[in-house]
């Protein structure tokens, strides 16, 4: 599989398109003034405790207070509160050594929110979900700093290895390496990308993350809640951090600064890959050049067409998303069961792509074409799970119900990507109404009269075919004939199918358009 990253920088922000085998699978938009992104660290002020929900509302600077549930407090919440207070009031002459920090006892899993946050303190929090619709951000106190090979979790000494690394020998090797280089008071989670990496690479990644924690500690000194303490990397670098592998063969950027930053970042994490970054010099829009714009227009509508003639209908409700699979004119054979299976398998691949592309989260209900055979239903479930395997968001696929519906849950991290692919009608400007042809007739004649006064001869009027039929109706007593008699010159009338209904243009005897 070939992966390409196309980066379009504009004044309002940066658009990033991820292509897999030339097919658009992810589209991200990073605003110029991006805030409250997933992973950002904020110093928040506890505003209100809700014992009934066992949760708290925290002011992090957003127009609506953020939500913090007890289950997101982290077992080390008391240590985090102590650290936050200590870092804010630290000696201006220097910073305390985090390795010497004395952690507090863990909180109980079944405790109450007021037992921990009863004093409504300032607390260091991490954005778990971006603001969605009328809801503020969702927060977590389980602080984690992700790197390319490892994830650092402060206030504990746990070492964990990704379950996707199946080799027991490799798991033991990585555990032993991390155990030898791990700083005190830091837990480490080894990511799947660390498989096969040596001690130096893991140590370099770990040092960088520990330095980020020190920077955050420095920013906390003298800070006043609410404020941002540490930002997540840019969307470009975070995607490269998580996705960069041997399948990546091209990264194209149209902004010189982003090009340099991207190249430097790849030089740091994967020097052998730095040559895949190229700068886009062409004056044509970069998304048009690489076919991204066309795919966006084709993929974000209510109806999504499939190559076979089948199509999807995607509807959004307050509680869930509904996807309906329709066969259209598709007919592979006379076997209805086989037709249904082939259409459903094709739809499953497109649905998995659509979930990634639109970043649809929550509950998704899919109404596939009914199939009778249990083996076919099993094949469809396996195909759906296989197509969803490339999705980085946590998800679960449930078996097809007796009503023929498949339920999918997908982690919701940020608002759904929604692009309006419909364009305003150039004739009516979106009103749904156009001016009467009678008025149009007067408008054409007014311009014709002006051109005759300006001594123009041999005039040709180009109009829409329907308007042509109206102006030439009756031949001898037609409107065109009337104009010829009135202005004492021959008026030529022709049609253009590309014109919209009320569009018209004048041309002189040399067939050059006369600008009015």
Image (spheres, grey):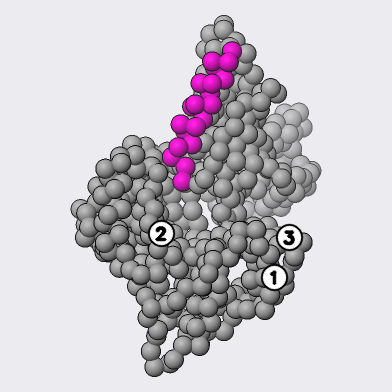
Residue drawn 41% across and 59% down?
Answer: 158
Crowd around label 2: few <14 · some 14–19 · many ≥20 (10 Å): some
Q: Is residue 272 left or right of residue 34?
A: left
Q: Range of the magenta residues?
A: 373-392
Assess whether residue 188 is covered by the magenta stretch.
no
Helix, strand or loop at mark 2: loop
Q: Residue 498 occupies which quadrant of the picture?
A: top right
Asked if 183 appears above or below 218 in the picture, the reply is above
How would you classify the magenta stretch by its main secondary structure?
helix
* Residue position marked by numbered label 2 in the rendering: 158
Assess whether residue 374 is covered by the magenta stretch.
yes
* Residue position marked by numbered label 1 in the rendering: 114
Crowd around label 3: few <14 · some 14–19 · many ≥20 (10 Å): few
Q: Position of residue 401 (x, y in %)?
A: 66, 26
Q: Earlier in the sequence, mark 1 or mark 3?
A: 3
Q: Is residue 173 visible?
A: yes
Q: Is residue 36 left or right of residue 189?
A: right
Crowd around label 1: few <14 · some 14–19 · many ≥20 (10 Å): some
Helix, strand or loop at mark 3: loop
Residue drawn 50% across and 83% down?
Answer: 86
Q: Is residue 426 visible?
A: no
Q: CA distance from mark 1 to mark 2?
A: 28 Å
* Residue position marked by numbered label 3 in the rendering: 53
Q: Residue furthest bottom?
A: 93
Q: Residue furthest top?
A: 334
Asked if 95 appears above or below 277 in the picture, the reply is below
Helix, strand or loop at mark 1: helix
Q: Position of residue 494 (x, y in %)?
A: 60, 35
């Amino acid at each position: 599989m070939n992966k390409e990253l196309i980066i379009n920088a504009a004044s309002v922000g940066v658009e990033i398109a991820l292509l897999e085998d030339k097919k658009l699978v992810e589209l991200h938009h990073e605003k110029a003034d991006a805030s409250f992104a997933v992973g950002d660290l904020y110093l928040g002020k506890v505003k209100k405790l809700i014992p009934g929900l066992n949760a708290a509302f925290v002011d992090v600077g957003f127009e609506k207070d953020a939500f913090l549930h007890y289950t997101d407090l982290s077992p080390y919440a008391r240590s985090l509160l102590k650290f936050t207070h200590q870092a804010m009031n630290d000696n201006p002459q220097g910073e305390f050594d985090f390795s010497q920090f004395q952690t507090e006892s863990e909180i109980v899993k079944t405790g109450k929110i007021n037992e921990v946050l009863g004093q409504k303190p300032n607390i260091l929090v991490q954005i778990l979900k971006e603001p969605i619709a009328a809801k503020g951000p969702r927060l977590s106190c389980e602080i984690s700093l992700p790197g390319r090979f490892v994830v650092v979790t402060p206030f504990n000494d746990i070492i964990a290895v990704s379950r996707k690394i199946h080799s027991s020998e490799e798991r033991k090797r990585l555990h032993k390496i991390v155990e030898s280089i791990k700083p005190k008071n830091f837990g480490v989670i080894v990511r799947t990308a660390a498989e096969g990496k040596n001690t130096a690479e893991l140590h370099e990644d770990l040092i960088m993350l520990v330095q980020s924690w020190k920077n955050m500690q420095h920013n906390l000194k003298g800070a006043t809640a609410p404020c941002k303490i540490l930002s997540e990397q840019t969307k470009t670098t975070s995607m490269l951090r998580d996705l960069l592998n041997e399948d990546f063969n091209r990264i194209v950027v149209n902004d010189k600064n982003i090009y340099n930053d991207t190249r430097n970042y790849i030089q740091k994490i994967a020097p052998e890959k730095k040559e895949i970054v190229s700068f886009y010099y062409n004056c044509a829009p970069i998304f048009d050049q690489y076919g991204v714009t066309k795919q966006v227009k084709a993929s974000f509508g209510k109806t999504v067409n499939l190559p076979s003639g089948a199509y999807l209908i995607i509807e959004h409700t307050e509680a869930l998303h509904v996807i309906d699979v329709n066969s259209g004119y598709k007919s592979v054979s006379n076997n209805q069961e086989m037709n249904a299976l082939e259409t459903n398998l094709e739809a499953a691949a497109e649905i998995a792509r659509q979930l990634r592309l639109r970043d649809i989260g929550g509950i998704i209900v899919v109404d596939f074409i009914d199939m009778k055979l249990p083996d076919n239903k099993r094949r469809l479930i396996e195909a759906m799970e296989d197509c969803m395997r490339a999705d980085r968001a946590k998800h679960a696929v449930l078996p097809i119900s007796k009503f023929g519906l498949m339920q999918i849950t997908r982690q919701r991290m940020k608002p759904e990507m929604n692009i309006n692919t419909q364009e305003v009608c150039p004739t009516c400007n979106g009103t749904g109404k156009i001016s009467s042809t009678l008025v149009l007739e007067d408008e054409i004649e007014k311009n014709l009269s002006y051109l005759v006064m300006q001594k123009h001869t041999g005039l040709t009027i180009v109009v829409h075919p329907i308007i042509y039929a109206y102006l030439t109706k009756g031949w001898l007593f037609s409107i065109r004939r009337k104009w010829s008699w009135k202005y004492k010159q021959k008026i030529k009338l022709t049609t253009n199918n590309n014109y919209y209904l009320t569009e018209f243009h004048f041309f002189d005897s040399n067939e050059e358009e006369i600008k009015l």
